Structures are given as C-alpha cells and as structure tokens.
Amino acid sequence: MTSPPAAKHIYSPAMGWIRNWRRRRILREPFPEHWLEIIAEHSNFIEQMPADRLAKFRSDLQIFVHEKVFIGAQGFEITEEVRVVIGAAAVRLILYLDLSYFDRVSEILVYPGAYHHPDDRETGILGQVDDWNTVVLSWPAVVAGLRNSRDGHDTATHEFAHVLDRNSGAFNGTPVLRANEDYAEWGRVLSHYYLELRDGKTNNRPLLRDYAATNEAEFFAVATEVFFEKPRVMQRKAPDLYEELQTFFGADPASWGK
C-alpha cells in the first residue's frame, strides 16, 4: 500500500490554539498503562494494531478521555472503564486521521441498556448521533460489539462513523475526504453498493446487513463496521469498496494481525 496523503484538519490552527495548548498539557501527564489492560478485557484490536500506530493511539485516547463529557443516563455510573473503552473504540477509527475529526463531539450520553426515543416508545435504540454531535450509546451494546471483533457488528464503531460523516455538514454517507479528487470515485463506488443493496440486486447481503440499505449515512456506518471487523471478507467480496474506505481511513486492517 502506498502512503496516503496527509489527512486534512477540520479546524484551522488559529481557531484551535487554546485546544492545542490544553492538549499539550494533557499529554505532559504519563499515559495510564492500565488502560491497555482495560481495553484488552473487552477487545483484542490493540494486539492486531500496527506497532507504529500505538503511540498515536495512546495520545489520542488520553486526550479523548480527558476532553469529552461523559454523562450517565438513568442512573448509569460513568467509570474509568466506560470512558476508556468508548474512547478506544472512537480513536481506533482515526489511527491514520487527525484527532480533529472528533472535535465536534460535545458529549457522550451512556445508557445502562437500550433506550427509547420520545417519538418512538416501542423501539429500543442502541446508539445514536444527533446534529449537534451528541453521541448516545447503550453500554451493553458497546461491550457486546467489541467482544466479538469479527462479526461485523459494533455499536460504538457505527456511531462514531456517523460523527465522521457529520463533519461534512450532513449525515449523507460522505465524510470529509482527504483530497478533492477522492469524491468522484467515492460517490461512484459507494453508490453502486448502496443501490444494489437497496434494490435487492446484490450477493453482498452476508457482508453488509440489510440496515445498510436504510440510507447513505447508515450504509457508510455499517460499511465502516465491516471494514474494521471483517476486513479480509470485504477485501475479497467488495475490493473496490474496501479500497475506498482504505483510502479515507488510511488503514489496511486486512493486513493487521497477520
């Protein structure tokens, strides 16, 4: 794989100088080594991660955990474990992207189980991101998604993919890509797989579950889950889709752990 171009920062240095100063202060503190043990209790993705990405993962995680506001809903207690595990799921997505991709996350609301939207009291929701980039997560769903790292279902990955998507200004399945010339091929490839899935003209349903056909935003979020959890299957069944996600994320998870 050739080296991807440097990822674009979403905010200018002039707008973020206070944030950058605070982040430098956070990183002066030693990284809590026991955090890696906490993550390892829930998932093995650190073991599979390229060694040259571990330092960035640690620093991004340290900043994410300190910066983001975690709120427990319905009496749920926000512990160090909750912060670290959710933070790890988020920063895994940006191993080759800048931490600024999550700057718009205002708060993370964590429920002790499935929650119910005021407009829909029947359907239990496991995760959600709103237009203000408040991330809502069910803690049991986060844990279950990370426990099985090869089933293509990961609630935290799904919702933080929506955050990346929303950075472009809308939930439309197209995040802020690395270069202007990337958009045409991105649109062509993802539209092809989305429309095939939506119209039932595909043999990729074992790869991408039906929920991916809901709309373009859900297609990107589901595809991101599969890209990180079943990368070799995606690379084999949908190589051009894998290539587009690889170009955006900068990662090649199909080669991890080999």
Image: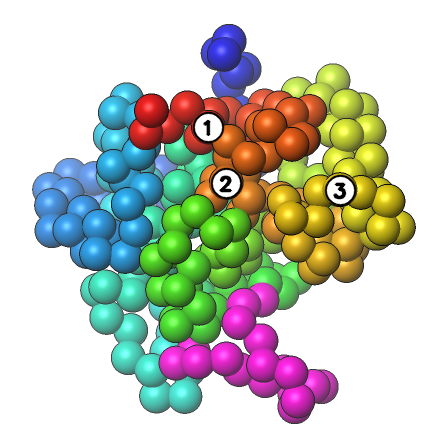
Say what amino acid the circle numbered 3 marks: Asn
Gap in Å between the C-alphas at discs 3 and 2? 16 Å
Residue 26, percent from left and from top: 22, 45
Residue mark closest to the camera, 3 vs 1: 3
Q: What residue lies at 35% left-to-right and 53% top-to-bottom? A: 87
Which one is nearer the viewer's eye here, 65 or 50? 50
Whether residue 177 can be seen here: no
- Where 45 falls versus 249 (above or below)? below
Q: Quick check: marks 3 and 2 in contact, CB under 8 Å?
A: no
Within the magenta stretch, is there residue 116? yes
Specify the label residue 254 is tagged with.
1
- Where 20 falls versus 8 (above or below)? below
Q: Mark 2 points at which residue?
A: 230
Q: Residues within 10 Å of mark 2 (few under 14, many from 20)?
A: many
Which secondary structure lies at badge 2?
A: loop
Within the magenta stretch, is there residue 77? no
Residue range highlighted in magenta: 110-128
Q: Residues within 10 Å of mark 3 (few under 14, many from 20)?
A: few
Answer with left or right where residue 20 lies relative to residue 231. Answer: left
Answer with left or right where residue 78 lies relative to residue 226. Answer: left
Type of secondary structure dominating the magenta stretch: strand
Gap in Å between the C-alphas at discs 2 and 1? 8 Å
Say what amino acid the circle numbered 2 marks: Lys
Q: Mark 3 points at which residue?
A: 203
Residue 78, percent from left and from top: 29, 73
Q: What residue lies at 18% left-to-right and 47% top-to-bottom? A: 36
- Where 77 falls versus 139 (above or below)? below
- Where 184 falls versus 214 (above or below)? above
